[in-house]
Image: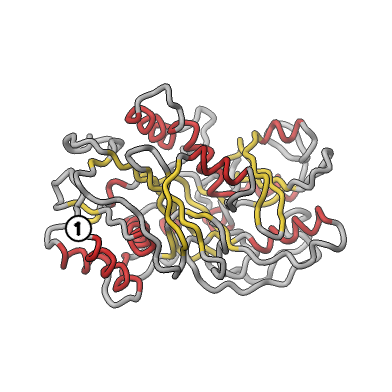
């Protein structure tokens, strides 16, 4: 959970394709919460596209997390950000935000800073509560059922937690002394790192949480079952326009259609993840439980080519240099790199080489997004290279550095 943005003020002058690449390289910020962003100065050189110049100083990537909540009807929850938000203005996003001290400890340095841990999980559940009023917690450490509480209590609690007057865990204990957050119900679904040239950077852990109306027993040892919901209320409510104006469940394919038809704004990470989810949850030929299980199997499956499963992918997106033979002004966003910190640590972490996201930029935001195969885009002549290479020496050096 995902990028912050600034207005593209020089769109009408110069080379549109070059300006788009410059703008996108300087404005991608993975954000999942409303916070101040300082607008950078647009540079004339593209630090990723041509490898000429890189910033002298790199801001640290601040930990954050986000949750993709799947309803018992297999619909996905998105929030509509307020127009005045300094991140995602007027866009639809997954609930989420940065990690604070009450969520737990995240290492200051090292590979573990960018791996799934309890602090990331608590932060995702806290942000979900603050932004929607939904509480994902169990009655006790052994109960398969999620806790239910009056809406009045939840509304009062989310205000207290959001204002920092009480921690999420402390508030939950006040409501039910034995209650525990349902951190085990979260499925890691990729980690996103803001590119190095952005003033404010984030390392964002994405999660999937699938609710179910089933009253079945405890989850199996694999941890891949859905979560019994009992009588808990999972109706989301806006936060009085603090950060969002609406909170809505829709099927993944419906969200994608709304974005492609220009009715809503989705940023590339949300669009990509909804695209992957739709392949499984929108397959009406299968029972709901089987669709959810197939999605979770996909997230944990390690491809035969040795690339990491989606549960472990680390993605730091960047714009590929394009030839634009179709003259449609679409940029191509690559997803294979894991980010400068992971490369410098020699973690071997990788993103997704097989897919890219194409899009156009307008004054309203991202438009005409589509997920395509990278080989297909190369064969069309949009980007350099054949096979797993791309013809760009700077990019090839970076790929070798992470042992692609």
| Residue depicted at 22% across the width and 68% down the height | 171
| Residue depicted at 47% across the width and 47% down the height | 190
Q: Of 54 and 16, which appears nearest the observer?
A: 16
User: Is 118 on the left or on the right of 357, as rendered?
Assistant: left
Measuring from the top left, give residue 44's x and y in whole percent: 81, 65
Mark count: 1
Measuring from the top left, give residue 387's x and y in whole percent: 70, 31
Give the class, few, some or many, for how many residues have Cα within 10 Å of label 1's Cα (few <14, many ≥20). Answer: few
Measuring from the top left, give residue 77's x and y in whole percent: 42, 49
| Residue depicted at 73% across the width and 50% down the height | 394
User: Is 188 on the left or on the right of 181, as rendered?
Assistant: right
The answer to which quarter of the image holds residue 196 is: bottom right
User: Is 90 on the left or on the right of 170, as rendered?
Assistant: right
Mark 1: secondary structure: loop
User: Is 236 on the left or on the right of 357, as rendered?
Assistant: left
Image: 398 above or below 203 = above
Measuring from the top left, give residue 326's x and y in whole percent: 82, 38
Residue hosting label 1? 149
- Furthest residue in direction right, as rendered: 14
Quarter of the figure that contains the C terminus: top right
Image: 349 above or below 110 = above
| Residue depicted at 50% across the width and 55% down the height | 93
Q: Of 158 and 377, which appears nearest the observer?
A: 158
Task: Identify the coloring.
Answer: secondary structure
């Amino acid at each position: 959970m995902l990028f912050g943005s600034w207005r593209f003020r020089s769109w009408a002058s110069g080379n549109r394709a070059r300006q788009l690449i410059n703008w996108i390289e300087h404005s991608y910020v993975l954000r999942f919460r409303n916070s101040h962003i300082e607008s950078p100065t647009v540079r004339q050189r593209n630090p990723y596209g041509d490898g000429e110049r890189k910033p002298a100083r790199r801001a640290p990537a601040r930990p954050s997390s986000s949750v993709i909540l799947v309803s018992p009807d297999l619909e996905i929850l998105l929030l509509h950000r307020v127009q005045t938000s300094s991140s995602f203005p007027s866009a639809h996003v997954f609930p989420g935000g940065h990690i604070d001290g009450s969520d737990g400890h995240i290492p200051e340095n090292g590979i573990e800073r960018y791996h799934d841990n309890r602090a990331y999980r608590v932060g995702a559940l806290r942000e979900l509560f603050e932004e929607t009023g939904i509480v994902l917690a169990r009655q006790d450490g052994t109960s398969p059922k999620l806790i239910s509480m009056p809406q009045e209590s939840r509304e009062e609690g989310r205000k207290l937690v959001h204002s920092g007057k009480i921690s999420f865990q402390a508030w939950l204990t006040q409501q039910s002394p034995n209650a525990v957050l349902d951190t085990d119900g979260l499925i890691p679904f990729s980690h996103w790192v803001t590119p190095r040239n952005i003033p404010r950077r984030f390392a964002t852990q994405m999660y999937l949480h699938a609710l179910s109306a089933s009253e079945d027993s405890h989850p199996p040892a694999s941890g891949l079952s859905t979560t019994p919901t009992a009588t808990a209320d999972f109706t989301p409510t806006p936060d009085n326009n603090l950060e969002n104006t609406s909170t809505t469940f829709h099927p993944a394919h419906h969200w994608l259609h709304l974005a492609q038809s220009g009715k809503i704004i989705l940023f590339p990470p949300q669009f990509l993840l909804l695209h992957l989810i739709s392949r499984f949850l929108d397959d009406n030929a299968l029972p709901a439980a089987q669709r959810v299980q197939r999605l979770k199997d996909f997230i944990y499956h390690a491809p035969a080519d040795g690339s990491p499963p989606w549960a472990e992918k680390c993605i730091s997106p960047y714009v590929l240099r394009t030839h634009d033979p179709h003259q449609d002004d679409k940029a191509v966003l690559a997803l294979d790199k894991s980010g400068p910190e992971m490369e410098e640590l020699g973690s071997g972490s990788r993103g997704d080489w097989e897919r890219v996201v194409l899009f156009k930029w307008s004054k309203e935001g991202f438009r005409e997004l589509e997920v395509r195969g990278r080989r297909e885009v190369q064969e069309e002549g949009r980007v350099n290279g054949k096979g797993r290479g791309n013809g760009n020496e700077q990019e090839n050096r970076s790929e070798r550095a992470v042992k692609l």
